Image: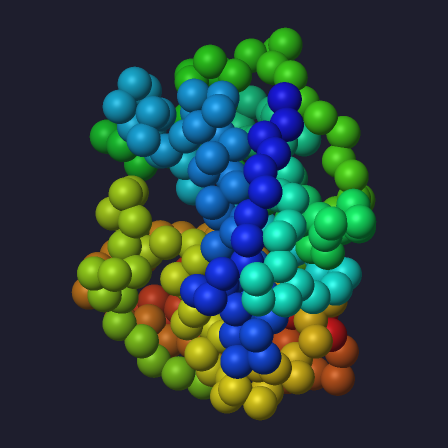
């Protein structure tokens, strides 16, 4: 089953160049996942209320093929492309009016039990062997990200507005921490082809985090850490 909607790229989604920003892109993907899962009655609010569980992002890789202007209307499509006993993968395609894909995300998620914090089987929320999946429109493979020997670039504190319904720092807020290590000119000229994120742990209101970054000729390697342990790590391919 494919969730599909038309979306105008509004001012909150664009950067200083009046084009869909990296933050905006991650927000569009997050909203599409939430809405698509809502259509399946598997959204975060429903699984909390009915199954005493919550979803966490474990990996997200976005391929970027072009840009979208402020005020432009795009088609956003979201669907489940893979299911296993422990995880689910949702694909999100952002298409221009001519049908071309401007950005494509594959996002892996797993379930955690609210009471214990342990991983739950997807079958515990009704995702069985006959669950309908769709074929991916773009081949995406998750890569191993090495975040060793990264200099510290920033220090941040998790604030109330970074927190989502799971009472932990929202996945998009981590991207804000990462992208804030660039100035406007650097961010505008970054020209990323891929952004991959591996979410390894949770952080909570009041946590003190450090952001680490190393720039290489063909990529940027970044991580967010709490007390020296990696919370998320990211690779931006240029």
Give left or right: position of 123 versus 79: left
Residue ID at (39%, 62%): 173
Depth order, front residue of 139/153: 139
Q: Quadrant of the N terminus?
A: top right
Residue ID at (33%, 71%): 209
Depth order, front residue of 238/146: 238
Q: Quadrant of the C terminus?
A: bottom right
Eyeballing the image, is 117 above or below 196?
Answer: above
Eyeballing the image, is 71 above or below 113?
Answer: below
Confirm whether residue 69 shows in the render: yes
The part of the image, by quadrant, that contains residue 162 is bottom left
The mark tally for this picture is 0
Eyeballing the image, is 134 above or below 146?
Answer: above
Residue ID at (59%, 87%): 186
Depth order, front residue of 108/115: 108
Q: In x, y percent, where is residue 38?
A: 44, 28
Q: In x, y percent, where is residue 63?
A: 71, 57
Q: In x, y percent, where is residue 190?
A: 66, 80
- The scheme the figure's colours follow is rainbow
Depth order, front residue of 72/233: 72
Q: In x, y percent, where is residue 204?
A: 26, 56
Residue ID at (64%, 38%): 77
Confirm whether residue 221 shows in the render: no
């Amino acid at each position: 089953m494919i969730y599909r909607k038309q979306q105008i790229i509004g001012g909150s989604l664009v950067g200083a160049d009046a084009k869909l920003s990296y933050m905006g892109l991650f927000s569009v993907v997050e909203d599409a996942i939430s809405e698509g899962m809502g259509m399946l009655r598997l959204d975060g609010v429903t699984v909390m209320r009915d199954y005493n569980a919550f979803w966490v992002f474990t990996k997200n890789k976005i391929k970027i093929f072009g840009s979208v202007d402020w005020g432009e209307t795009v088609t956003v499509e979201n669907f489940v492309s893979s299911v296993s006993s422990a995880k689910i993968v949702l694909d999100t395609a952002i298409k221009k009016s001519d049908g071309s894909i401007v950005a494509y995300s594959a996002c892996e998620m797993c379930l955690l039990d609210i009471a214990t914090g342990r991983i739950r089987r997807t079958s515990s929320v009704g995702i069985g062997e006959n669950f309908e999946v769709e074929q991916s429109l773009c081949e995406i493979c998750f890569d191993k990200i090495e975040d060793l020997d990264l200099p510290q670039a920033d220090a941040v504190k998790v604030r109330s507005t970074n927190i989502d319904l799971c009472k932990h720092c929202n996945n998009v807020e981590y991207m804000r921490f990462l992208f804030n290590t660039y100035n406007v000119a650097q961010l505008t000229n970054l020209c990323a082809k891929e952004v991959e994120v591996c979410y390894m742990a949770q952080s909570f209101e009041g946590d003190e985090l450090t952001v680490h970054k190393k720039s290489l000729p063909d990529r940027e390697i970044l991580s967010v850490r709490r007390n020296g342990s990696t919370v998320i790590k990211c690779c931006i391919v240029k």
